Image: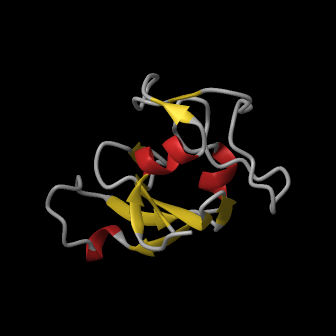
Amino acid sequence: MFNGEYSTAATMFALGFIPGGKLGMKIVGKASKSFKSPSRKGYDVFNHDGTLTNEAIKNSRIIIKAKDLGNPRIPSGYGKYTTKHYDTPSGKADTHFYMNEEGKIHYDLDYKSNF
C-alpha cells in the first residue's frame, strides 16, 4: 500500500483502465461499466470513459470555493471538490476535481486521486 497524491490516470490504471476513451482511459478485463468500491456497494466512482459518475458528483463536497482559489490556471468560477472516500486495491482514496456552479467539471487540469 502507498500513501500520497497520484494522478487519476495512475489510479485508473491500477483499477484496470488503459489508455483510450474520452479522458485517455478505458476499462479492460472483467471491469464493469463503472468502478464499484467493494466497501460501498453500489457507490460508483468512475464512468467507463474515466469521468466521474453522477452519484460521485452528487455525493462530493466543496473543499475550496471558487473565490478562494489561487490557481490562475483554473478557469474563473470553478471551485475545488472532493468525492467521498472509496476503497481501491491500493487503499482508501478520494478524487479531487474542479466544478462550476452549473455543474460543469474541468477535467483537463488537476483531476486526481489521493491515497
Query: Quick one: which residue is furthest to the right in this view?
Result: 41
Who's the residue at 59% across and 62% down the image? Answer: 90
Examine the rendered structure and indicate whether residue 96 appears above or below residue 109.
below
Q: Nearer the viewer, residue 45 or 28?
A: 28
Who's the residue at 65% across and 56% down the image? Answer: 58
Image x and y of residue 65, in percent: 37, 72
- Which image quadrant is residue 92 in? bottom right
Q: Nearer the viewer, residue 70 or 7?
A: 7
* Number of numbered discs: 0
- Which image quadrant is residue 6 in? bottom left
The colour scheme is secondary structure
Who's the residue at 61% across and 26% down the image? Answer: 28
Examine the rendered structure and indicate whether residue 16 appears above or below residue 77.
above
Who's the residue at 69% across and 43% down the image? Answer: 35
Task: Point out the image quarter for the N terminus.
Answer: bottom right
Q: Nearer the viewer, residue 44 or 58?
A: 44
Image x and y of residue 70, in percent: 19, 72
Q: Nearer the viewer, residue 85 or 68?
A: 85
Image x and y of residue 67, in percent: 28, 72
**On the picture, is 55 further left or further right than 70?**
right
